Image (tube, rainbow, N blue to C red):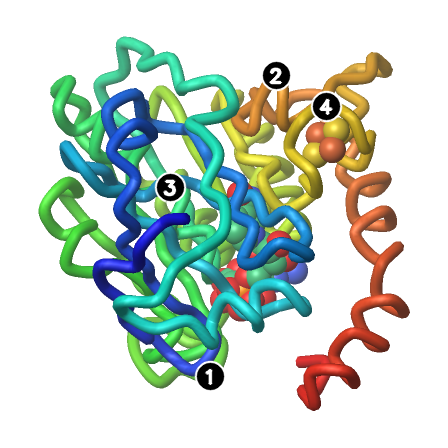
Amino acid sequence: MYEILEKLELNKDVDLFKIKAPLVAKNTKPGNFVIVRVDKLGERIPLTIVESDSESITIISQKVGFSTKLLSKKEKGDFIEDVVGPLGEAIKIKNIKNLIAIAGGVGAAPLYPQLKSYHSSGTKIDLIIGAKDKEHLLLMDKFAEVCENIFVTTDDGSVGRKGFVTEVLKERLKDKSYDFSITIGPLIMMKNVLLINKDYNLPTDVSLNPIMIDGTGMCGNCRVSINGKNHFACVEGPDFSAEGIDFDELISRQRYYKDKEHVCNLRLGESDD
Ligand code: NAD
Ligand code: FES
């Protein structure tokens, strides 16, 4: 059993949990994730480790399905049945001078540990971060510590530029030369970022965390076709070079479980959004 040391409701849809897990914490590297099981009958939830210290890890969870809504009902002092990890391949820090990072919504959470590592190795980082509205922008204080410039967009214009991150990206790439890009957010956003970056021959990494289910290489859901070859996000990733990823296949697969989620949400007395 793993104790929740701290819980913060970052907005109505997203919670941050600091969990006591010394063995996981000691071995964590940027890019790793854990599998969380809320109770004995719970399903497995793969979540990126956002930060760690000598005895605890921090994860950020968006209430999108039955299990993340169950997790959200836990409070400081409560216990979580299982926290397994660290899992996945840690990121390999490349020698990069100027990096442009693009975060969409809750994708900011897995992006932060990567940018922190690049900042520590001397990379200059510009960040474009977008969300539905002001409340859904995550970790802004932390990003300010590791980024040179931050460009904000919101879908409703409540702060920053009104519109999608991709509109700002087009302008930035006209203005300044970068040697690498990392983007994490909704699949459709990462697909569109890649299309823009291609015009500038800008190598781009993405995270395929959202297509994972069991996180062990057993369920097959995180299969991703890259240049026609199958790979598994939970074993070989979750971070990949975006070149050649079949995003359309991933987007259609992400809809598989919508009906089952609907039934589970009815059991919890929650809506589907
Ligand atoms: P969201 O739908 O609010 O989108 C966040 C931002 O992405 C938007 O503000 C916009 O700037 C950009 N965006 C959205 N659609 C776009 C489009 N068609 N073209 C260009 N830009 C677009 O995001 P949310 O609700 O916070 O995030 C949920 C999604 O993020 C889920 O699909 C989840 O699976 C995914 N996610 C991805 C990762 C990852 O590792 N890639 C991690 C966590 C969550
Ligand atoms: Fe199931 Fe990777 S998440 S095989």
**Residue holding disc 3:** 111
Q: Secondary structure at mark 3?
A: helix
Q: Secondary structure at mark 4?
A: loop
Q: Which mark is residue 236?
A: 2
- In percent of the image, x 76 and y 38: which residue is there? 247
Q: Quadrant of residue 96?
A: top left
**Residue holding disc 4:** 217
Front residue of 97 and 51: 51
Front residue of 141 and 209: 209
- In percent of the image, x 47 and y 51: which residue is there? 107
Does label 4 point to a residue whose CB lies under 8 Å from ligand 2? yes
Front residue of 185 and 272: 272
Sequence-earlier tag: 3 or 4? 3
From the viewer's perspective, is 257 left or right of 64? right
Q: Find out whether the residues at labels 1 and 3 contact each other: C-beta distance under 8 Å.
A: no
Q: Nearer the viewer, mark 2 or mark 3?
A: 2
Q: Amino acid at mark 1?
A: Asp
Number of residues whose C-alpha sits closer than 10 Å to that of mark 3, classed few (under 14), some (14–19) or many (20 or more): many
